[in-house]
Amino acid sequence: MTKLIGIYGASGFGREVMPVARAQHPSGTRLVFIDDNAGNGDRQHSGHAILSWDDFTREATGRDAAVAVAIAASQVRERLTERCAAAGISICSISASNIVIGDNIVIGEGAILQPFAMLTADCRIGRGFHANIYSYVAHDCVIGDFVTFAPRVMCNGNVHIEDHAYIGTGAVLRQGTPEKPLVIGAGATVGMGA
Ligand code: UDP
């Protein structure tokens, strides 16, 4: 039976991630959206079915299936990641074909790396990271779980970002040093253009 991949979230970000997932996976893979509000609106988008969680788990039974959570709100992302774990469904990562990943990059499960993202060298990145288009993480950064980069975030070297921080579009994070990294605290929001 063909592999089943669910992109959780059929709104803005999910619709941006779907073509990247489609490019990553061979044509035999069935790619669907999962959305908890599936009953209220469209049943498909760009030819991909929009399923409720229950319908997805029914299809996933006895099948090679995985989910990528494509929802920017990090607390929702963590909750839905746990929902998948509880149902025995694995989490997968999605990566655009033109991303640049340098040496010694360790990255947790469930990352979504959108087109033109770059991770340069010696970085540790936790679970559920989202790097939206044109964002980069430079050398020696440490990034926690469920961190979100909006488009074109510029994260320079020796920056530590704790869990659930949200970095807005075009923000520039000044570099730290090995002795004194720049720290963005847990749950912080860095504004657009900051
Ligand atoms: N959503 C969901 N389950 C949840 C929370 C959100 O399926 O527990 C869906 C919601 O119905 C919506 C999408 O996730 O379709 C989030 O869309 P939104 O526009 O808020 O965010 P974005 O796409 O920018 O991350």
Image: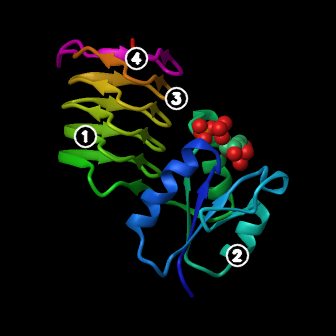
Q: Which tag is nearer the camera, tag 4 or tag 1? A: 1
Residue closest to the far right: 40
> What kind of element bears circle 4?
strand
Dot 3: element: loop
Which of the colour schemes (rainbow, by chain, secondary structure, one colour) is used? rainbow
- At label 1, which amino acid type do we have? Leu
- Which residue is depicted at the point 29% across and 44% down? 116
Neighbour class for label 3 at 10 Å: few (<14), some, many (≥20)?
many
Question: Marks 4 and 1, how far apart in space?
Answer: 18 Å
Task: Tell me, yes or no, whether the two marked residues, 1 and 3, touch with CB atoms within 8 Å.
Answer: no
Mark 1 CB lies closer than 8 A to ligand 1? no
User: Which is more N-terminal, label 2 or label 4?
Assistant: 2
Report the residue marked by disc 1.
119
Q: How far apart are marks 3 and 4 (CA)?
A: 10 Å
Answer above or below: position of 77 versus 54: above
Mark 4 — residue?
Answer: 184
Q: How far apart are marks 1 and 3 (CA)?
A: 19 Å
Q: Check residue 102 in the rendering and tell me which mark sits there, or answer none.
A: none
| Magenta region, residue range | 176-192
Q: Which residue is under mark 2?
A: 59
Horizontally, is 186 left or right of 88 in the view?
Answer: left
Q: In which quarter of the image is the C terminus?
A: top left
Q: Which amino acid does label 4 sit on?
A: Ile
